Amino acid sequence: MVDRIRELMHEIGEVTAETREEAEQLRLKYLSKKGLVSVLFDDFRSVPPDMKREVGKLLNELKTLTQEKIDALRSRFEDVVMPDSSTEDLTRPVTMEPGTRHPLSIVRNHIIDIFSHLGYTVAEGPEIEDDWHNFSALNFPPEHPARDMQDTFFISQDPAILLRTHTSSVQIRAMEKSQPPLRMIFPGRVFRNEAISARAHCIFHQVEGLYIDRNVSFADLKQTLLYFAREMFGEKTQIRLRPSYFPFTEPSGEMDVSCNICGGSGCNICKNTGWVEILGCGMVDPAVLDNCGIDSRVYTGFAFGMGIERITMLKYQIRDLRLFYENDVRFLKQFTGTI
Ligand code: PHE
């Protein structure tokens, strides 16, 4: 009997199982009512009394060993949960709705489309910029407030590395790389250190445009912007230019479009003026051309820049800019533009 117990102990030590079923087979083989271990307990009755103590102890050891081994083998397969095929209908049709483009993407693509008809190509640049491309090359004087931490997110101060505050930085990169004629637009994400409200966000999107060649005039700028406004807001749209100031353009202007909501008669979107401001623009300052290696005695050019959020709000009459960033499907699925 003792020999048989030791033999089984050895055997149990060696067994393995590759599947849950094999482990179950082992349990039946050793531990079920008629199993090899259980049968030894039946035989125990015939062990002479003076041996009972020793054999009983050994037999219990065998049982514990067998139980532990089989539990260990079974636990290896426990985390593999098989799908319950009786509750899953694998033939059920998929009823997922197709996604929609984000309104800001729809309007950005529309802007790109309009300018591509005028021969503009698209370029992008880095969101993390140095001082030269975001400020210095654009004629910002050293004491300009935009260079302050209050307005700009700096990554480091010396050297000044920052999150670009406008996509004008990409204009500089384009002018440094190629000689005129240049006719390009620059869509991208920009960053300003502003409190978030219904009308402002610290992250927003711009599209800037640049046209440089011989004899480019303010009249060209005006006609280009009129074409853009009518394509974007409708044929009857009027524009008006007001004098303004930017360090990198001279002269500079801001452009208003006639309110496409009330048609100019006055409403709360245009604050009863009939006009809404949509972009900044101007003739590229000769100093900026020279900074980029373009001869300002030969070439002139214009630039303009607009916020995509603002155009989108006007086009779709959205009153709170924060909706663009909340990912609320009820808001987003109302926009079905395809470009
Ligand atoms: N960069 C200006 C801004 O962010 C916009 C602008 C671009 C103005 C080009 C004039 C010319 O406000």
Image (cartoon, rainbow, N blue to C red):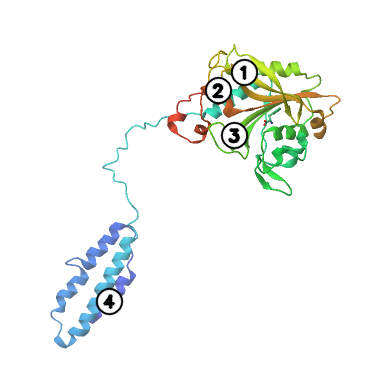
Amino acid tagged 3: Phe
Q: Residues within 10 Å of mark 4 (few under 14, many from 20)?
A: few
Instruction: Identify the image quadrant of residue 127.
Output: top right
Quadrant in which the N terminus is drawn: bottom left
Residue receiving disc 1: 257
Residue receiving disc 2: 314
User: What label sits on residue 204 in the rendered view?
Assistant: 3
Amino acid tagged 4: Glu
How far apart marks 2 and 3 lie (CA) works out to: 15 Å
- Image: 27 above or below 55: above
Residue at image x 78%, y 34%?
A: 139
Q: In what element is the residue under mark 2?
A: helix
Q: Residue furthest front?
A: 272
Residue at image x 14%, y 74%?
A: 42
User: Between tags 4 and 3, which lies in front?
Assistant: 3
Q: Position of residue 133 (x, y in %)?
A: 73, 38
Labels 1 and 3 touching (C-beta < 8 A): no
Labels 2 and 1 touching (C-beta < 8 A): yes
Q: Position of residue 131 (x, y in %)?
A: 73, 42
Q: In what element is the residue under mark 3?
A: strand
Residue receiving disc 4: 7
Q: In what element is the residue under mark 4?
A: helix
Quadrant in which the C terminus is drawn: top right
Amino acid tagged 1: Val
Q: Residues within 10 Å of mark 3 (few under 14, many from 20)?
A: many
Residue at image x 55%, y 13%?
A: 265
Instruction: Please indicate whether residue 151 sits to the left or right of residue 180 in the image.
Output: left
